[in-house]
Structure formats: structure tokens, C-alpha cells
Amino acid sequence: MKEQISIRDAMASDLDAVITLDQWAPMEEKPTYWSEVFDHYVRRNKTDRFFLVAESGNIVVGFIIGEVRAWEFGSPPCGWVFALAVSPESRQLGIGQKMFEEISKRLKQTGVTTVRTMVDRDDKLTLSFFRSLGLCTGKYLELEKQID
């Protein structure tokens, strides 16, 4: 890929590209979910929510979403990254790192000093990626219970 990578705020017109990049949800569930995410993070312009896309030659090749969350179980305000994807063809080009650095910069501008995320312990690729950026086990533990 010889094109310059740029990171910018997501726009409503990026919806289809984001749906295509999202490889986690079943295809039939994506349009509704992503439309709601776009309503919350793109269409409502807030200073503590960020939905960024990476673009190469006018093609969206990645996205990252995060926000400031405050006082969950006594935790002071922190940045929270809850979604990140890079097209398989564009991996190993530093796009994920560039997006993470940009969202971290924007989160820092809100006054937070910590960024958190959550990763499936079996997702070695994503876990390795975040660890390569300096993230490590934090003070809080995620707990869960099946409620079926």
C-alpha cells in the first residue's frame, strides 16, 4: 500500500465501510447495531466520544471507537476503547497503532490520564496488539456470569 494513511473523524457516509470491516457480529445483525453506534458516536457530536477511521486513497481501512467513562465502580474518569478493526489486507502497516495514538491524544485532551480496553483472553492477535502499545493488566477485573 503506497497511499498515505490519514486518521479522521468518522462520517455518516462511512457506515457501510465500517460494517464491512466488522468481522465479529453476524452479518444480519450489523446494520442495526452499527446504525445505533453511528447515531451515538457520529451524528451526536460530543467532546468525550470518538469514532475515528483510517483512510487510504479515499478507502476506509480501519476504525477505532472510544469515550470517556467516569466513576464506574469508583473508577475515576478514564478513556475506554471498545472497538478497533483494520482490514486484513492493511494489517502490519501501523494503522492500528496510528489510530490508537490519535484516540489516546484526543482522550488526553479531555483530561483523562488512563486508557482501558477489554480483550478476549483467547484473542491472541488483539491481545498482542494492545500489549505492543504498552497496555497491560489493570487495577480492575472483568467478572461475568451466564444468565441463560
Image (tube, grey):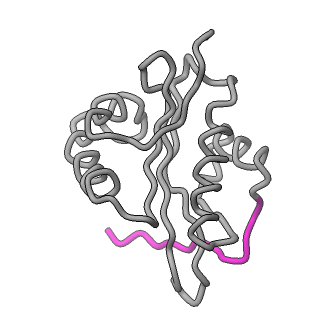
The residue segment tinted magenta is: 136-148
Q: Is 126 placed left or right of 38 in the picture?
A: right
Q: Give the image quarter of residue 3.
A: top right
Quadrant containing the N terminus is top right
Q: Give the image quarter of residue 76.
A: bottom right
| Residue 51 point in image, percent of width and height | 43, 49
Q: Is 135 placed left or right of 14 in the picture?
A: right
Camera-side residue of 14 and 91: 14
The residue at 47%/44% (across/down) is 52
The residue at 49%/26% (across/down) is 55
Q: Is 130 placed left or right of 84 in the picture?
A: right
Quadrant containing the C terminus is bottom left
Camera-side residue of 109 and 29: 109
- Determine whether 33 is above or below 59 in the image: below
4 falls in the magenta region: no
The residue at 53%/36% (across/down) is 7
| Residue 129 point in image, percent of width and height | 70, 41
Number of numbered tags placed on the structure image? 0
| Residue 141 point in image, percent of width and height | 64, 74
Q: Is 12 placed left or right of 143 in the picture?
A: left
